């Protein structure tokens, strides 16, 4: 009878095949969205539209699915933003640099609940044998029974299946105010707020040369700073 670790490995194989096609589709959609977003942004600025923010205009600031998709895109080193692991490095710094940045120099994998609905966690980024970053994106401030503990179990199973040392497995509980999880042992989690994340990402805006990316990132930072 297959062990839980073997089942997780088999499941990951299926996710990878499915996820690759969906990832390519997501990349194309994000590229198209970037172009459209930038065009609308530019025209609105030219017309001197005050306080223009497309995320707010489309009422997406508190849409958990949209925010998870955008965050996953930013954290994906292969994302069409072209910045490699820059945003993941900024995120991990908020957790005390518990994973050295050299571990992000090689390609890593992204799992999302949008790609794999069976996942409890919203986002998982990992490189076999190297590191694992698991994220519960909780904008709506709600938790299921034992949710946080079950997510830690899910992370540990994946970490074990991928032979990732526990000290390089981190779980992030992301909420508007940075509160600790209530549905499990908070000592297993790094509790971060969206304003903290926005401040960290703001630090890299000046070094971005892509105007389209700057437009979307600045507006995204603005809305998540006040979710």
Image (spheres, rainbow, N blue to C red):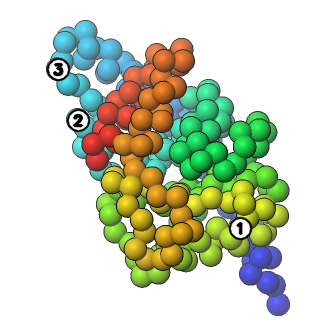
Q: Nearer the viewer, residue 167 or 83?
A: 167
Residue denoted by label 3: 50
Residue denoted by label 2: 57
Depicted 110 relative to depicted 151: above or below = above
The answer to which image quadrant residue 17 occupies is bottom right
Helix, strand, or loop for circle 2? helix
Relative image position of residue 187 (x, y in whole percent) = 54, 69
The residue shown at (79%, 84%) is 3
The residue shown at (56%, 38%) is 90
Q: Viewed as shown, does residue 179 lie left or right of 25? A: left
Q: Are marks 2 and 1 in contact (CB under 8 Å)?
A: no
Task: Determine if residue 198 is in view.
Answer: yes
Q: Nearer the viewer, residue 127 or 24?
A: 127
Residue at mark 3 to residue at mark 1: CA–CA distance:
47 Å
The residue shown at (43%, 69%) is 181
As drawn, the residue found furthest toward the bottom would be: 1
Task: Determine if residue 75 is in view.
Answer: no
As drawn, the residue found furthest toward the top would be: 46
Between disc 2 and disc 1, the foreground one is: 1
Labels 3 and 2: the sequence-earlier one: 3
Labels 2 and 1: the sequence-earlier one: 2
Relative image position of residue 116 (x, y in whole percent) = 58, 62
Residue denoted by label 1: 158
Q: How many residues crowd around disc 1 within 10 Å: few (fewer than 14), some, or many (20 or more)? A: many
């Amino acid at each position: 009878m297959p062990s839980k670790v073997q089942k997780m490995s088999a499941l990951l194989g299926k996710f990878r095949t499915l996820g690759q096609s969906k990832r390519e589709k997501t990349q194309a959609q994000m590229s198209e969205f970037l172009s459209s977003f930038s065009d609308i942004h530019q025209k609105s600025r030219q017309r001197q539209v005050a306080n223009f923010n497309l995320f707010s205009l489309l009422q997406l600031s508190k849409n958990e699915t949209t925010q998870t998709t955008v965050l996953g895109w930013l954290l994906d080193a292969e994302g069409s933003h072209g910045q490699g692991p820059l945003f993941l490095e900024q995120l991990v710094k908020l957790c005390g640099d518990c994973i050295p940045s050299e571990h992000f120099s090689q390609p890593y994998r992204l799992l999302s609940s949008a790609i794999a609905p069976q996942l409890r966690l919203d986002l998982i980024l990992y490189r076999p044998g190297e590191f694992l970053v698991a994220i519960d994106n909780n904008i709506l401030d709600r938790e299921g029974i034992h949710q946080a503990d079950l997510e830690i179990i899910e992370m540990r199973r994946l970490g074990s299946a991928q032979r990732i040392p526990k000290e390089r497995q981190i779980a992030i509980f992301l909420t508007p105010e940075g509160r600790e999880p209530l549905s499990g042992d908070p000592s297993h989690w790094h509790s971060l707020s969206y304003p903290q994340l926005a401040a960290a990402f703001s630090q890299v805006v000046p070094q971005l040369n892509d105007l389209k990316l700057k437009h979307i990132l600045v507006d995204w930072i603005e809305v998540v700073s006040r979710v």
